[in-house]
Image (tube, helix red, strand yellow):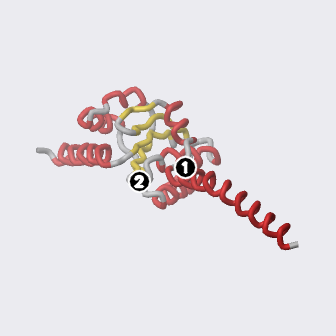
Amino acid sequence: MKPALQKKTAVVKEIVDNLKTANSAVIVEYQKLTVAEFTELRRTLTEKSVSIKVYKNNLVSLAAKEAGFGELDQFLTGPNAFAFGTGEEMAAAKTLAKFAKKHPALKLKAGIYEGKVLDTKAITEIALLPTKDELLSMFASSLLYPLRMFAIAVKEIAKTRSE
């Protein structure tokens, strides 16, 4: 096997592994970002257990078909970066969407979430959903509010009885 072919085969295998092990993946168009902005994006993503790499679209296409995500082909136009999340399920989409608000040059194109290929609209909607921790926090605060009101009422009753 020629060295160039070996290298491409290794890259396709790496992409397939990333697609299979990541709990979410997002494709972004990054072309108009500066090097400093892309470096900032990479640092921000790394903190959230998300890796981002630039691959050739044809290699991603081969890997996507091999991994069972052939529908990604329609989104593989122009220069793209590919983010693979291994931590919080929505971390890749949330972090990229938040970064895109500050840097409009970054555009979310598509993604993979729960084994399904999602278009731009769907991946953006997922980015707006609260995380598991945020949902648990909301639930806990909704449980504490009635207890707090009950405690205040008991305290007021005790105050009026002691007077």
Q: Is residue 149 above or below residue 23?
A: below
Q: Is residue 23 above or below residue 144?
A: above
- As drawn, is 126 to the left or to the right of 85? right
Confirm whether residue 2 shows in the render: yes
Which residue is drawn at the image coordinates 30% and 49% (left, top)? 21
Which residue is drawn at the image coordinates 40% and 38% (left, top)? 112
Q: Secondary structure at mark 2?
A: strand
Where does label 2 land, which residue?
Answer: 51
- As drawn, is 79 to the left or to the right of 94? left
- As drawn, is 106 to the left or to the right of 18? right
Percent position (x, y) of residue 17? 26, 47
* Along the viewing direction, whichever of 16 and 151 lies nearer the viewer: 151
Where does label 1 land, which residue?
Answer: 135
Q: Amino acid at mark 1?
A: Leu
Quarter of the rendering containing residue 127: top right
Mark 1 to mark 2 CA distance (whole Å): 25 Å
Looking at the image, tell me whether mark 1 or mark 2 is earlier in sequence order.
Answer: 2
